[in-house]
Image (cartoon, grey):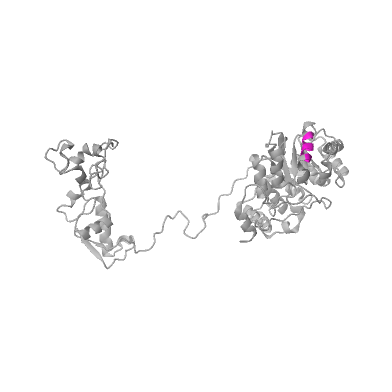
């Protein structure tokens, strides 16, 4: 029940004017002068329900006398002065009685309004107060007070909230807080095989087996800094010497993650290639075997051959290398053993943002095997990368460009497999983090979509069946990207 005794939910019958009679009949405010005689307690009253201006909740002329007082606004006062009547709300909560015999409105709010109007009328700045509003040539008089003829503010624009950025300035007025680097909280590995069953974890830092010829890089493996060695395919150049380096390096070192690559020519019989490689490095099985340069025409057959490696216990997981979005999507649909990883070239000039996102949605771990772009000057001498390196010197970290590129990959959650061109500096990527300014600079190196990025890894010349796919092909459609490529 409302404060005025009305029953707003009692709405069963309606009058001609659309109001609910049942609620109005028992509303105390309906028993005022001129109300219905059957409303109760008002035997001498006259008039009909349709003649009364009562609402369902007992509001009279839009105002409920039982509610707290609402002072009239300036616009209401001015409009009432023009009509020669009292302003709406004058009868609300005692304003009518306050006005009688006083020549104006009273109450705290009304007094404040009167003082403000007097201040504006006088054009003063008492005590350095608010700026003066320019008075209009039109004026009205009501209750002994004079008001301007309009409600528009003619003074200067308000200053606004001083804690917010001023109009036209960047949202971040101050430099954002730098995240605190804590090595103990760094991710040192990622789960492998989330597309199917998790079969292990791949370290964030890996090294190409050919780079083990550098004793300083080999030491990173023996001291536990780098825990992943990526072996080449059996028929690659100097594979025998490389496998001998791997065997020598991992001897007596526990917990080394060893991966192996199957070339397209070996995909018809991957078991023989894996057996030959395992014999040369002196291991029983590989942690990961990837199919390099997958060819769409023979993809399903080649993948089934790789699945037999898992069945026979020759590897824990299988994956892809240099696979595009359509290839990853196709394999994930027909494969019995889902791909655990996709090893490919990623760096700021070829970020593969769409491919990385698609792989993560399918539970495929993306790994970068060309984070420094094979040392190409287009990447290593990029102006923004040089600026990021200069910032590192200014902050006293003295991190090289190779280290910055490696760290950029780790901060986006992509493990790396670095080669000799990156050197030992890439092995320090877990010892620091890029500052906000450095991250912005390195991210800005990425070319626009219409250019598609820059590749530095080249496919074998004899491999004519493999073709690079558009890096934005597949996945979720982006209609606006077609316009971007057309420079529209």
Q: Is residue 44 above or below residue 78?
A: above
Q: Nearer the viewer, residue 13 or 310?
A: 13
Residue for point 67% across, 39% down: 363
Left/right placement of residue 422 relative to residue 444 reads right
Front residue (pair 426, 332) = 332
Give the position of the C terminus as an image quadrant: bottom right
Measuring from the top left, give residue 140's x and y in whole percent. 23, 63
Q: Please indicate whether residue 365 sits to the left or right of residue 64 in the image.
A: right
- Whether residue 366 is visible to the viewer of this picture, yes or no, is no
Of residue 1 and residue 431, the one placed in the foreground of this image is: 1
- Say above or below: 313 vs 183: above
Instruction: Check the image and name the residue furthest to the front.
Output: 16
Where residue 300 appears, as percent x and y from the top left, is 76, 40
Using the rendered view, name the quadrant where residue 50 is placed: top left
Q: Position of residue 280 (x, y in %)?
A: 87, 38
* Quadrant of the image containing the N terminus: top left
Question: Is residue 109 located in the magenta-colored stretch of the structure?
Answer: no
Name the residue rendered at 15%, 52% in the picture.
Answer: 100
Residue 234 location (% of width, % of height): 85, 42
Q: How many marks?
A: 0
Magenta range? 301-308
């Amino acid at each position: 029940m409302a404060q005025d005794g009305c029953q707003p939910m009692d709405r069963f019958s309606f009058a001609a004017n659309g109001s609910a009679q049942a609620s109005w009949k028992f509303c105390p405010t309906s028993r005022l002068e001129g109300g219905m005689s059957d409303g109760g307690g008002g035997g001498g009253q006259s008039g009909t329900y349709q003649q009364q201006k009562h609402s369902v909740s007992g509001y009279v002329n839009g105002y409920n006398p039982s509610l707290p007082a609402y002072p009239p606004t300036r616009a209401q006062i001015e409009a009432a002065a023009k009509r020669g009547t009292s302003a709406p709300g004058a009868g609300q909560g005692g304003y009518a009685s306050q006005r009688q015999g006083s020549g104006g409105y009273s109450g705290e709010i009304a007094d404040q309004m009167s003082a403000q109007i007097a201040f504006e009328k006088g054009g003063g700045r008492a005590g350095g107060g608010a700026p003066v509003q320019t008075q209009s040539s039109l004026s009205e008089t009501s209750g002994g007070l004079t008001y301007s003829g309009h409600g528009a503010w003619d003074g200067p624009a308000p200053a606004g909230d001083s804690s917010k950025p001023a109009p036209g300035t960047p949202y971040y007025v101050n430099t954002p807080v730098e995240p605190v680097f804590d090595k103990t909280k760094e991710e040192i590995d990622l789960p492998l095989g989330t597309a199917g069953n998790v079969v292990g974890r791949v370290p964030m830092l890996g090294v190409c087996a050919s780079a083990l010829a550098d004793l300083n890089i080999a030491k990173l493996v023996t001291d536990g800094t780098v825990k992943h060695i990526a072996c080449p395919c059996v028929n690659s150049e100097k594979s025998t010497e490389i496998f001998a380096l791997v065997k020598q390096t991992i001897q007596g070192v526990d917990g080394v993650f060893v991966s192996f690559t199957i070339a397209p020519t070996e995909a018809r019989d991957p078991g023989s290639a894996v057996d030959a490689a395992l014999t040369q490095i002196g291991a029983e099985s590989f942690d990961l075997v990837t199919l390099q340069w997958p060819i769409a025409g023979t993809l399903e057959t080649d993948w089934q051959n790789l699945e037999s490696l898992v069945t026979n216990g020759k590897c824990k997981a299988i994956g892809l290398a240099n696979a595009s979005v359509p290839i990853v999507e196709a394999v994930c649909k027909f494969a019995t053993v889902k791909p655990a990883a996709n090893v490919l070239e990623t760096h700021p000039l070829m970020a593969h943002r769409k491919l990385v996102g698609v792989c993560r949605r399918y539970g495929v771990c993306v790994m970068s095997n060309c984070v420094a772009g094979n040392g190409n000057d287009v990447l290593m001498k990029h102006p923004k990368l040089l600026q990021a390196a200069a910032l590192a010197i200014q902050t006293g970290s003295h991190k090289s460009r190779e280290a910055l590129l490696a760290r950029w990959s780790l901060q986006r959650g992509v493990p790396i497999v670095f080669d000799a061109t990156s050197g030992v500096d890439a092995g320090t990527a877990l010892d620091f983090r890029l500052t906000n300014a450095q991250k912005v600079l390195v991210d800005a190196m990425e070319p626009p979509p219409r250019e598609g990025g820059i590749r530095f890894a080249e496919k074998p010349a004899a491999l004519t069946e493999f073709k690079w796919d558009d890096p934005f092909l597949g996945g979720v459609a982006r209609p606006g990207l077609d316009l971007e490529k057309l420079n529209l």
